[in-house]
Image: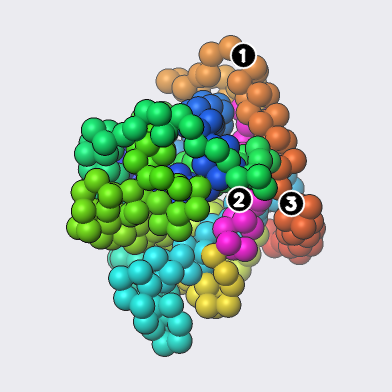
Amino acid sequence: MKRAVSRWEIVGFSINDVIGSGVYLLPAAAAANLGSASVGAIVLAGLGVLMLVLCFAEAASYFDRPGSAYVYTREAFGELVGFEVGWMTWLARVSSVASLSAGFARALGYLWPQANEGVGRALAIALPLLLLTAINVVGVKSGARTAVFLAITKTLPLLLFIGAGIFFVSWEQASSVVAKPEGGLGAAVLLLLFAYAGFENTAAPAGEFKNPRRDVPFALIVQIGVVTFIYTAVQWVALGTLPGVVDAQTPLADAAARFLGGWGGLVMTVGAVLSILGTNSNTVLAGPRYLYALARDGFGPRVLASLHPRFRTPTAAILTQTAIALPLAFSGSFEVLATLSVVARLATYFGTALAVPVLRRKLRQQPGAFRIPGGPVIPLAAAALCVVFAMSAQPRNLVAGAIALAVGGVLYALRSPPRTGTPE
Protein backbone atom coordinates (compact mmCIF):
# COMPACT_ATOMS: atom_id res chain seq x y z
CA MET A 1 0.00 0.00 0.00
CA LYS A 2 1.09 3.57 -0.67
CA ARG A 3 1.69 5.70 2.44
CA ALA A 4 0.18 8.90 1.10
CA VAL A 5 -2.08 10.46 3.77
CA SER A 6 -0.74 13.26 5.99
CA ARG A 7 -1.56 14.22 9.59
CA TRP A 8 -4.12 16.95 8.86
CA GLU A 9 -5.76 14.87 6.19
CA ILE A 10 -6.25 12.21 8.89
CA VAL A 11 -7.79 14.88 11.15
CA GLY A 12 -10.22 15.84 8.38
CA PHE A 13 -10.94 12.17 7.73
CA SER A 14 -11.69 11.60 11.42
CA ILE A 15 -13.99 14.63 11.79
CA ASN A 16 -15.77 13.72 8.56
CA ASP A 17 -16.55 10.25 9.89
CA VAL A 18 -18.14 11.49 13.12
CA ILE A 19 -20.11 14.58 12.04
CA GLY A 20 -22.84 13.02 9.94
CA SER A 21 -26.60 12.98 9.77
CA GLY A 22 -26.83 12.72 13.57
CA VAL A 23 -26.02 16.36 14.27
CA TYR A 24 -28.90 17.53 12.06
CA LEU A 25 -31.39 15.30 13.89
CA LEU A 26 -29.82 15.40 17.35
CA PRO A 27 -31.33 18.67 18.71
CA ALA A 28 -34.95 17.51 18.40
CA ALA A 29 -34.35 13.89 19.42
CA ALA A 30 -32.15 14.76 22.40
CA ALA A 31 -34.55 17.47 23.56
CA ALA A 32 -37.51 15.09 23.23
CA ASN A 33 -35.78 12.66 25.61
CA LEU A 34 -34.01 15.02 28.01
CA GLY A 35 -35.38 18.56 27.55
CA SER A 36 -32.98 21.36 28.44
CA ALA A 37 -30.72 18.83 30.17
CA SER A 38 -29.78 17.60 26.68
CA VAL A 39 -27.05 20.25 26.47
CA GLY A 40 -25.30 18.91 29.55
CA ALA A 41 -25.93 15.35 28.38
CA ILE A 42 -24.08 16.05 25.13
CA VAL A 43 -21.08 17.34 27.08
CA LEU A 44 -21.13 14.30 29.37
CA ALA A 45 -21.47 11.99 26.38
CA GLY A 46 -18.46 13.67 24.81
CA LEU A 47 -16.43 13.08 27.98
CA GLY A 48 -17.59 9.46 28.06
CA VAL A 49 -16.70 8.87 24.43
CA LEU A 50 -13.35 10.57 25.13
CA MET A 51 -12.46 7.52 27.23
CA LEU A 52 -13.11 5.27 24.24
CA VAL A 53 -11.20 7.65 21.96
CA LEU A 54 -8.18 7.53 24.29
CA CYS A 55 -8.25 3.72 24.17
CA PHE A 56 -8.20 3.78 20.38
CA ALA A 57 -5.48 6.44 20.42
CA GLU A 58 -3.18 4.31 22.58
CA ALA A 59 -3.89 1.10 20.66
CA ALA A 60 -3.30 2.88 17.34
CA SER A 61 0.10 4.13 18.51
CA TYR A 62 1.37 0.51 18.61
CA PHE A 63 0.57 -0.38 14.98
CA ASP A 64 1.10 0.92 11.45
CA ARG A 65 -1.00 -1.59 9.50
CA PRO A 66 -4.68 -1.51 8.47
CA GLY A 67 -7.49 -3.07 10.48
CA SER A 68 -7.94 -0.86 13.57
CA ALA A 69 -9.85 -2.74 16.32
CA TYR A 70 -9.43 -6.08 14.53
CA VAL A 71 -5.65 -5.74 14.72
CA TYR A 72 -5.67 -4.54 18.33
CA THR A 73 -7.89 -7.33 19.69
CA ARG A 74 -6.21 -10.04 17.62
CA GLU A 75 -2.83 -9.06 19.02
CA ALA A 76 -4.21 -8.91 22.56
CA PHE A 77 -6.54 -11.91 22.73
CA GLY A 78 -5.81 -14.14 19.76
CA GLU A 79 -7.41 -15.05 16.47
CA LEU A 80 -10.96 -15.92 17.57
CA VAL A 81 -11.62 -12.71 19.52
CA GLY A 82 -9.84 -10.66 16.87
CA PHE A 83 -11.93 -12.16 14.11
CA GLU A 84 -15.21 -11.65 15.97
CA VAL A 85 -14.35 -7.99 16.56
CA GLY A 86 -13.23 -7.55 12.95
CA TRP A 87 -16.38 -9.27 11.71
CA MET A 88 -18.69 -7.10 13.86
CA THR A 89 -16.75 -3.98 12.90
CA TRP A 90 -17.18 -4.71 9.22
CA LEU A 91 -20.90 -5.48 9.73
CA ALA A 92 -21.18 -2.04 11.32
CA ARG A 93 -19.48 -0.57 8.25
CA VAL A 94 -21.61 -2.26 5.61
CA SER A 95 -24.85 -1.53 7.50
CA SER A 96 -23.67 2.05 7.94
CA VAL A 97 -23.05 2.41 4.19
CA ALA A 98 -26.55 1.11 3.54
CA SER A 99 -28.22 3.29 6.18
CA LEU A 100 -26.38 6.43 5.09
CA SER A 101 -27.22 5.79 1.43
CA ALA A 102 -30.91 5.42 2.34
CA GLY A 103 -30.66 8.48 4.60
CA PHE A 104 -29.05 10.50 1.80
CA ALA A 105 -32.02 9.78 -0.46
CA ARG A 106 -34.40 10.88 2.32
CA ALA A 107 -32.48 14.11 2.97
CA LEU A 108 -32.25 14.85 -0.75
CA GLY A 109 -36.02 14.43 -0.92
CA TYR A 110 -36.43 17.82 0.81
CA LEU A 111 -34.70 19.44 -2.18
CA TRP A 112 -35.78 16.99 -4.90
CA PRO A 113 -39.08 15.27 -4.01
CA GLN A 114 -38.56 12.55 -6.63
CA ALA A 115 -35.79 11.13 -4.43
CA ASN A 116 -38.43 9.84 -2.01
CA GLU A 117 -39.71 6.99 -4.17
CA GLY A 118 -39.36 4.86 -7.27
CA VAL A 119 -36.63 5.44 -9.83
CA GLY A 120 -35.64 8.74 -8.23
CA ARG A 121 -34.95 7.05 -4.90
CA ALA A 122 -32.97 4.28 -6.59
CA LEU A 123 -30.81 6.84 -8.39
CA ALA A 124 -30.34 8.93 -5.23
CA ILE A 125 -29.05 5.82 -3.44
CA ALA A 126 -26.99 4.24 -6.19
CA LEU A 127 -25.26 7.09 -8.02
CA PRO A 128 -23.53 8.74 -5.00
CA LEU A 129 -22.44 5.35 -3.64
CA LEU A 130 -21.04 4.26 -7.00
CA LEU A 131 -19.21 7.59 -7.36
CA LEU A 132 -17.63 7.25 -3.90
CA THR A 133 -16.67 3.68 -4.73
CA ALA A 134 -14.91 4.80 -7.92
CA ILE A 135 -13.07 7.60 -6.08
CA ASN A 136 -11.74 5.15 -3.51
CA VAL A 137 -10.72 2.57 -6.11
CA VAL A 138 -8.55 5.18 -7.83
CA GLY A 139 -6.51 5.73 -4.66
CA VAL A 140 -6.54 6.41 -0.94
CA LYS A 141 -5.21 9.93 -1.55
CA SER A 142 -8.23 10.83 -3.67
CA GLY A 143 -10.49 9.25 -1.05
CA ALA A 144 -8.81 11.18 1.78
CA ARG A 145 -8.95 14.47 -0.11
CA THR A 146 -12.63 13.91 -0.86
CA ALA A 147 -13.19 13.27 2.85
CA VAL A 148 -11.38 16.48 3.81
CA PHE A 149 -13.37 18.50 1.25
CA LEU A 150 -16.65 17.07 2.51
CA ALA A 151 -15.60 17.63 6.14
CA ILE A 152 -15.14 21.34 5.37
CA THR A 153 -18.39 21.66 3.43
CA LYS A 154 -20.38 19.96 6.19
CA THR A 155 -18.75 21.93 9.03
CA LEU A 156 -19.14 25.42 7.56
CA PRO A 157 -22.99 25.42 7.70
CA LEU A 158 -22.81 24.28 11.34
CA LEU A 159 -20.37 27.07 12.22
CA LEU A 160 -22.65 29.54 10.44
CA PHE A 161 -25.60 28.21 12.45
CA ILE A 162 -23.66 28.64 15.71
CA GLY A 163 -22.06 32.00 14.86
CA ALA A 164 -25.29 33.66 13.74
CA GLY A 165 -27.71 31.84 16.03
CA ILE A 166 -25.90 32.62 19.27
CA PHE A 167 -27.10 36.26 18.96
CA PHE A 168 -30.74 35.15 18.80
CA VAL A 169 -30.75 32.64 21.64
CA SER A 170 -33.34 33.12 24.34
CA TRP A 171 -31.71 31.87 27.52
CA GLU A 172 -35.09 31.53 29.20
CA GLN A 173 -36.41 29.40 26.34
CA ALA A 174 -33.25 27.26 26.10
CA SER A 175 -33.37 26.46 29.81
CA SER A 176 -37.08 25.62 29.96
CA VAL A 177 -37.52 22.95 27.26
CA VAL A 178 -39.49 20.00 28.63
CA ALA A 179 -38.93 16.43 27.43
CA LYS A 180 -41.78 14.41 25.97
CA PRO A 181 -43.56 12.10 28.45
CA GLU A 182 -42.44 9.03 26.51
CA GLY A 183 -38.82 10.23 26.43
CA GLY A 184 -36.12 8.92 28.71
CA LEU A 185 -32.46 8.42 29.42
CA GLY A 186 -32.28 4.94 27.90
CA ALA A 187 -33.32 6.11 24.45
CA ALA A 188 -31.02 9.12 24.70
CA VAL A 189 -27.93 7.00 25.47
CA LEU A 190 -27.87 5.14 22.15
CA LEU A 191 -28.86 8.31 20.33
CA LEU A 192 -25.83 10.13 21.70
CA LEU A 193 -23.57 7.17 20.95
CA PHE A 194 -24.78 7.20 17.33
CA ALA A 195 -23.98 10.92 17.10
CA TYR A 196 -20.40 10.43 18.35
CA ALA A 197 -19.71 7.13 16.58
CA GLY A 198 -17.29 6.79 13.68
CA PHE A 199 -13.99 7.67 15.36
CA GLU A 200 -13.07 3.97 15.48
CA ASN A 201 -12.53 3.97 11.71
CA THR A 202 -9.78 6.58 11.77
CA ALA A 203 -7.05 3.94 11.93
CA ALA A 204 -8.67 1.46 9.51
CA PRO A 205 -6.51 2.65 6.55
CA ALA A 206 -3.36 2.97 8.74
CA GLY A 207 -1.30 1.11 6.15
CA GLU A 208 -1.78 4.11 3.83
CA PHE A 209 -0.95 6.84 6.37
CA LYS A 210 2.50 8.42 6.33
CA ASN A 211 3.04 8.15 10.10
CA PRO A 212 0.00 6.41 11.62
CA ARG A 213 1.48 5.64 15.05
CA ARG A 214 2.02 9.34 15.67
CA ASP A 215 -0.76 10.95 13.63
CA VAL A 216 -3.78 8.76 14.45
CA PRO A 217 -3.74 9.52 18.21
CA PHE A 218 -3.34 13.23 17.40
CA ALA A 219 -6.26 13.16 14.95
CA LEU A 220 -8.53 11.27 17.38
CA ILE A 221 -7.99 13.72 20.23
CA VAL A 222 -8.44 16.80 18.00
CA GLN A 223 -11.60 15.25 16.56
CA ILE A 224 -13.34 14.61 19.89
CA GLY A 225 -12.64 18.18 21.01
CA VAL A 226 -13.98 19.73 17.80
CA VAL A 227 -17.04 17.49 17.65
CA THR A 228 -18.02 17.98 21.29
CA PHE A 229 -17.82 21.76 20.91
CA ILE A 230 -19.92 21.78 17.72
CA TYR A 231 -22.57 19.40 19.09
CA THR A 232 -22.93 21.33 22.35
CA ALA A 233 -23.14 24.74 20.67
CA VAL A 234 -25.61 23.51 18.04
CA GLN A 235 -27.85 22.03 20.73
CA TRP A 236 -27.88 25.24 22.76
CA VAL A 237 -28.68 27.43 19.74
CA ALA A 238 -31.46 25.07 18.58
CA LEU A 239 -33.08 25.00 22.04
CA GLY A 240 -32.87 28.78 22.38
CA THR A 241 -34.14 29.77 18.94
CA LEU A 242 -36.74 27.16 17.95
CA PRO A 243 -39.97 26.94 19.98
CA GLY A 244 -41.34 23.41 19.86
CA VAL A 245 -37.93 21.95 19.03
CA VAL A 246 -38.95 18.57 20.51
CA ASP A 247 -41.41 18.05 17.63
CA ALA A 248 -39.27 19.41 14.78
CA GLN A 249 -38.53 17.06 11.86
CA THR A 250 -35.70 19.26 10.56
CA PRO A 251 -34.66 21.22 13.66
CA LEU A 252 -31.56 22.98 12.31
CA ALA A 253 -33.21 24.02 9.05
CA ASP A 254 -36.29 25.23 10.95
CA ALA A 255 -34.22 27.18 13.48
CA ALA A 256 -31.96 28.74 10.82
CA ALA A 257 -35.02 29.82 8.82
CA ARG A 258 -36.26 31.72 11.89
CA PHE A 259 -33.12 33.81 12.47
CA LEU A 260 -31.57 33.87 8.97
CA GLY A 261 -34.63 33.66 6.75
CA GLY A 262 -35.49 31.12 4.08
CA TRP A 263 -31.96 30.97 2.70
CA GLY A 264 -30.70 29.86 6.12
CA GLY A 265 -33.02 26.88 6.13
CA LEU A 266 -31.87 25.99 2.61
CA VAL A 267 -28.21 26.18 3.65
CA MET A 268 -28.81 23.81 6.56
CA THR A 269 -30.72 21.40 4.34
CA VAL A 270 -27.85 21.34 1.84
CA GLY A 271 -25.46 20.93 4.78
CA ALA A 272 -27.40 17.88 5.97
CA VAL A 273 -27.20 16.28 2.52
CA LEU A 274 -23.45 16.94 2.29
CA SER A 275 -22.97 15.73 5.85
CA ILE A 276 -24.49 12.34 5.10
CA LEU A 277 -22.51 12.10 1.86
CA GLY A 278 -19.30 12.95 3.71
CA THR A 279 -19.77 10.29 6.35
CA ASN A 280 -20.58 7.74 3.68
CA SER A 281 -17.40 8.71 1.84
CA ASN A 282 -15.38 7.76 4.92
CA THR A 283 -17.25 4.50 5.35
CA VAL A 284 -16.66 3.49 1.75
CA LEU A 285 -12.95 4.17 2.35
CA ALA A 286 -12.57 2.53 5.77
CA GLY A 287 -14.85 -0.51 5.56
CA PRO A 288 -12.97 -2.41 2.85
CA ARG A 289 -9.73 -2.13 4.85
CA TYR A 290 -11.31 -4.41 7.47
CA LEU A 291 -12.20 -6.94 4.76
CA TYR A 292 -8.66 -6.67 3.39
CA ALA A 293 -7.06 -7.21 6.82
CA LEU A 294 -9.35 -10.17 7.58
CA ALA A 295 -8.65 -11.79 4.20
CA ARG A 296 -4.89 -11.34 4.65
CA ASP A 297 -5.19 -13.47 7.80
CA GLY A 298 -7.17 -16.20 6.06
CA PHE A 299 -10.70 -15.06 6.91
CA GLY A 300 -12.31 -14.83 3.50
CA PRO A 301 -11.55 -15.37 -0.19
CA ARG A 302 -8.00 -14.61 -1.23
CA VAL A 303 -9.19 -12.09 -3.81
CA LEU A 304 -10.28 -9.76 -0.97
CA ALA A 305 -6.64 -9.58 0.11
CA SER A 306 -5.48 -8.37 -3.31
CA LEU A 307 -4.38 -4.86 -4.27
CA HIS A 308 -4.97 -3.09 -7.56
CA PRO A 309 -1.72 -3.34 -9.57
CA ARG A 310 -1.72 0.37 -10.38
CA PHE A 311 -3.63 2.14 -7.61
CA ARG A 312 -2.50 -0.18 -4.75
CA THR A 313 -5.97 -0.08 -3.19
CA PRO A 314 -8.00 -3.13 -2.02
CA THR A 315 -10.26 -2.87 -5.05
CA ALA A 316 -11.94 -6.27 -4.67
CA ALA A 317 -12.84 -5.49 -1.05
CA ILE A 318 -14.17 -2.05 -2.02
CA LEU A 319 -16.37 -3.47 -4.79
CA THR A 320 -17.56 -6.34 -2.58
CA GLN A 321 -18.70 -3.98 0.17
CA THR A 322 -20.61 -1.80 -2.29
CA ALA A 323 -22.22 -4.85 -3.91
CA ILE A 324 -23.57 -5.93 -0.49
CA ALA A 325 -24.53 -2.46 0.73
CA LEU A 326 -26.55 -1.47 -2.34
CA PRO A 327 -29.34 -4.06 -2.03
CA LEU A 328 -29.47 -3.43 1.72
CA ALA A 329 -29.95 0.28 1.09
CA PHE A 330 -32.71 -0.41 -1.44
CA SER A 331 -34.59 -2.78 0.87
CA GLY A 332 -33.92 -1.56 4.41
CA SER A 333 -34.97 1.51 6.32
CA PHE A 334 -32.54 4.08 7.63
CA GLU A 335 -33.48 3.52 11.27
CA VAL A 336 -33.19 -0.29 11.27
CA LEU A 337 -29.81 -0.27 9.53
CA ALA A 338 -28.50 2.54 11.73
CA THR A 339 -29.46 0.63 14.89
CA LEU A 340 -27.70 -2.50 13.64
CA SER A 341 -24.62 -0.37 12.99
CA VAL A 342 -24.62 1.03 16.55
CA VAL A 343 -25.05 -2.38 18.24
CA ALA A 344 -22.29 -3.92 16.12
CA ARG A 345 -19.97 -1.05 17.06
CA LEU A 346 -20.22 -1.95 20.75
CA ALA A 347 -18.15 -5.09 20.13
CA THR A 348 -15.48 -2.88 18.55
CA TYR A 349 -15.41 -0.46 21.48
CA PHE A 350 -15.55 -3.10 24.21
CA GLY A 351 -12.83 -5.24 22.64
CA THR A 352 -10.46 -2.33 22.11
CA ALA A 353 -10.93 -0.95 25.63
CA LEU A 354 -10.07 -4.32 27.17
CA ALA A 355 -7.18 -4.82 24.74
CA VAL A 356 -5.29 -1.69 25.83
CA PRO A 357 -3.96 -3.02 29.20
CA VAL A 358 -2.95 -6.28 27.47
CA LEU A 359 -1.15 -4.45 24.67
CA ARG A 360 0.74 -2.41 27.25
CA ARG A 361 2.17 -5.58 28.73
CA LYS A 362 2.91 -7.23 25.41
CA LEU A 363 4.28 -4.18 23.55
CA ARG A 364 5.72 -2.07 26.35
CA GLN A 365 9.01 -1.60 24.50
CA GLN A 366 7.31 0.31 21.67
CA PRO A 367 9.15 3.67 21.34
CA GLY A 368 6.97 6.78 21.20
CA ALA A 369 3.71 4.98 21.97
CA PHE A 370 0.86 7.13 23.31
CA ARG A 371 0.04 6.20 26.90
CA ILE A 372 -3.25 6.98 28.69
CA PRO A 373 -2.60 8.26 32.21
CA GLY A 374 -4.03 6.47 35.24
CA GLY A 375 -3.02 2.90 34.49
CA PRO A 376 -5.98 0.62 33.69
CA VAL A 377 -8.64 2.97 35.11
CA ILE A 378 -9.73 4.64 31.85
CA PRO A 379 -9.72 1.46 29.71
CA LEU A 380 -11.80 -0.39 32.32
CA ALA A 381 -14.17 2.57 32.68
CA ALA A 382 -14.51 2.69 28.89
CA ALA A 383 -15.37 -1.02 28.84
CA ALA A 384 -17.98 -0.46 31.56
CA LEU A 385 -19.44 2.38 29.48
CA CYS A 386 -19.92 -0.07 26.60
CA VAL A 387 -21.94 -2.29 28.94
CA VAL A 388 -24.15 0.70 29.82
CA PHE A 389 -24.67 1.40 26.12
CA ALA A 390 -25.59 -2.25 25.52
CA MET A 391 -28.11 -2.22 28.39
CA SER A 392 -29.81 0.75 26.71
CA ALA A 393 -30.43 -1.18 23.48
CA GLN A 394 -33.67 -2.94 22.68
CA PRO A 395 -33.63 -6.70 23.41
CA ARG A 396 -34.27 -7.48 19.74
CA ASN A 397 -31.18 -5.48 18.78
CA LEU A 398 -29.05 -7.41 21.28
CA VAL A 399 -30.45 -10.68 19.91
CA ALA A 400 -29.49 -9.56 16.40
CA GLY A 401 -25.99 -8.81 17.69
CA ALA A 402 -25.76 -12.24 19.30
CA ILE A 403 -26.82 -13.89 16.04
CA ALA A 404 -24.16 -11.93 14.17
CA LEU A 405 -21.52 -13.12 16.68
CA ALA A 406 -22.71 -16.71 16.21
CA VAL A 407 -22.44 -16.40 12.43
CA GLY A 408 -18.93 -15.03 12.97
CA GLY A 409 -18.08 -18.12 15.01
CA VAL A 410 -19.16 -20.34 12.12
CA LEU A 411 -17.11 -18.33 9.63
CA TYR A 412 -14.10 -18.56 11.94
CA ALA A 413 -14.41 -22.35 12.02
CA LEU A 414 -14.34 -22.37 8.20
CA ARG A 415 -11.25 -20.16 7.95
CA SER A 416 -8.40 -20.94 5.57
CA PRO A 417 -4.64 -20.63 6.28
CA PRO A 418 -3.30 -17.06 6.67
CA ARG A 419 -1.95 -15.30 3.59
CA THR A 420 1.75 -14.83 3.36
CA GLY A 421 3.71 -12.36 1.29
CA THR A 422 2.22 -9.42 -0.55
CA PRO A 423 -0.95 -10.35 -2.43
CA GLU A 424 -1.24 -9.04 -5.95
Give the percent coordinates (x, y) of residue 209.
Answer: 35, 43
Check disc 3 and give the amino acid type. Gln
Q: Earlier in the sequence, mark 1 or mark 3?
A: 1
Q: What span is in magenta?
A: 335-356
Which image quarter holds the C terminus?
A: bottom left
In the image, is residue 118 above or below residue 419? below
Q: Nearer the viewer, residue 388 or 115?
A: 115
Distance between mark 3 and mark 2 Cα atoms: 12 Å
Mark 2: amino acid: Val
Residue at x-position 35% and y-position 69%:
110
Q: CA distance from mark 1 to mark 3?
A: 33 Å
The answer to the question of whether label 2 and label 1 lie on touching residues, with beta carbons closer than 8 A, is no
Residue 339 is one of the magenta-drawn residues: yes
Q: Earlier in the sequence, mark 2 or mark 1?
A: 2
Residue 342: numbered disc: 2
Q: Residues within 10 Å of mark 2 (few under 14, many from 20)?
A: many
Query: Hey, which quadrant is residue 367 in on the image?
Result: top left
Which one is nearer the viewer's eye here, 292 or 321? Answer: 321
> Which is more foreground, mark 3 or mark 2?
3
